[in-house]
């Protein structure tokens, strides 16, 4: 895997394997290195095929982002409801697909199940015990 210069949030060289070409910015900006924000479309194939970055945020990225949001501080000041609903919907789809295809690695799945908070109908994040 090659190295890629990213400028967000601060200039740094990162492993291409730790980057994605595109992802929902409202959900992942500051949490994933999104190369489409920084590079022209002409280098997309090079970044994916040669350097080894992922073309998009995968199941594990969504699960890890949800786990990162699953805490009391986030529950007090949640991200926009569109972010919560988008992630929750993706995780529901991942869950159904994972049962058929094992689309998420076991470690990410275990972290999601054991540490992920729930989203209530009124868009509140609540711990699993509740």
Image (tube, rainbow, N blue to C red):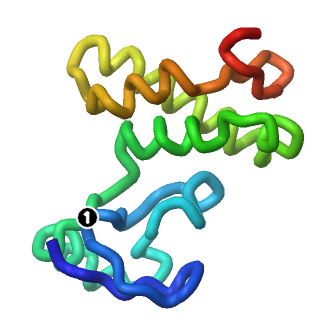
Please report the residue visible at 24 percent of the width from the left and 13 percent of the height from the top.
Answer: 100
- The foreground one among 88 and 107 is 107
**Relative vertical location of residue 57 with respect to residue 8 in this rendering, above or below:** above
For the N terminus, the image quarter is bottom left
For the C terminus, the image quarter is top right
Q: Residues within 10 Å of mark 1 (few under 14, many from 20)?
A: some
Res 44 quadrant in image: bottom left
Q: Is 116 displayed left or right of 104 in the figure? A: right
Residue found at the very far left of the displayed protein: 50
Q: Which residue is mark 1?
A: 17
**Relative vertical location of residue 28 with respect to residue 105 in this rendering, above or below:** below
Please report the residue visible at 13 percent of the width from the left and 69 percent of the height from the top.
Answer: 49
Q: Is 102 displayed left or right of 22 in the figure? A: left
- The foreground one among 104 and 21 is 104
Q: Is 123 displayed left or right of 10 in the figure? A: right
Position in image of residue 29 (x %, y %): 58, 64
Q: Is 55 displayed left or right of 90 in the figure? A: left
Position in image of residue 74 (x %, y %): 77, 42
Please report the residue visible at 88 percent of the width from the left and 39 percent of the height from the top.
Answer: 76
Position in image of residue 14 (x %, y %): 34, 77
Position in image of residue 67 (x %, y %): 56, 36
Res 48 quadrant in image: bottom left
**Relative vertical location of residue 93 with respect to residue 7 in this rendering, above or below:** above
- Badge 1 element: helix
Res 82 quadrant in image: top right
Please report the residue visible at 48 percent of the width from the left and 27 percent of the height from the top.
Answer: 112
């Amino acid at each position: 895997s090659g190295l890629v210069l990213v400028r967000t949030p601060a200039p740094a060289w990162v492993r291409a394997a730790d980057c994605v070409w595109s992802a929902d910015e409202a959900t992942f900006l500051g949490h994933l290195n999104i190369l489409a924000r920084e590079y022209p479309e002409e280098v997309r194939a090079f970044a994916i095929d040669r350097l080894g970055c992922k073309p998009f945020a995968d199941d594990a990225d969504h699960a890890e982002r949800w786990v990162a949001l699953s805490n009391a501080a986030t529950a007090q000041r949640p991200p926009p409801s569109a972010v919560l609903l988008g992630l929750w919907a993706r995780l529901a789809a991942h869950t159904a697909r994972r049962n058929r295809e094992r689309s998420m690695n076991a470690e990410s799945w275990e972290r999601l199940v054991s540490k992920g908070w729930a989203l209530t109908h009124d868009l509140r994040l609540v711990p699993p015990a509740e």
